[in-house]
Amino acid sequence: MEATDLATISGNINTIGYGLATVGPGIGMGILIGKTVESMARQPEASGQLRATMFLGIAFVEVLALLGLVAGFLFT
């Protein structure tokens, strides 16, 4: 096995790792947005506060996806 073959295999593994790292935040965002919409349907008067909290939660969940991307580049 040559050195270039090993680099190619490593690159493919990093791509798979990033794909797996986005699964968790994707599921988390789906649950977060779904529960917020459900809460807005139950209490429409609280929708402003719920929306603000949802966007804050989405920001934190997106940080997890970005950390997965950065970790894929750092640990090569």
Image (cartoon, rainbow, N blue to C red):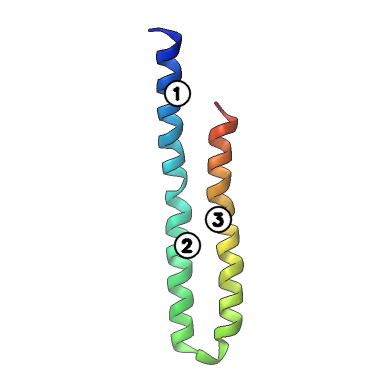
**Whole-percent x, y for residue 42 in the image:** 45, 88
Give the amino acid type for the residue marked by disc 1 in the picture. Answer: Ser
Q: Furthest residue to the top? A: 2
Which image quadrant for residue 48?
bottom right
| Residue placed under numbered mark 1 in the picture | 10
Q: Residue at x 48, y 82 (%)?
A: 39
Disc 2 is placed on an element classified as: helix
Q: Which of marks 1 and 3 is nearer the N terminus?
A: 1
Question: How many neighbours does mark 1 have within 10 angstroms: few (below 14), some (14-19), or many (20 or more)?
Answer: few
Report the residue at 41% width, 7% height from top.
2
Q: Could you tell me if the residues under marks 3 and 2 are in contact, i.e. CB atoms within 8 Å?
A: yes
Residue 29 image label: 2
Marks 3 and 2, how far apart in space? Answer: 8 Å
Across and down, in percent, residue 64 comes to: 56, 50
Which residue type does callout 3 highlight?
Glu
**Rendered-image quadrant of the C terminus:** top right
Tell me the residue that label 3 is attached to: 62
Q: In which quarter of the image is the N terminus?
A: top left
Residue 68 in the image, given as x and y percentages of width and height: 53, 43
Q: Is mark 1 on a helix, strand or loop?
A: helix
Q: Quadrant of residue 6?
A: top left
Q: Which amino acid does label 2 sit on?
A: Met
Q: Reply above or below: 64 against 43.
A: above
Binning the other alpha carbons within 10 Å of mark 2 as few (below 14), some (14 to 19) or many (20 upward) gives some
Ranked by sequence position, the earlier of labels 2 and 1 is 1
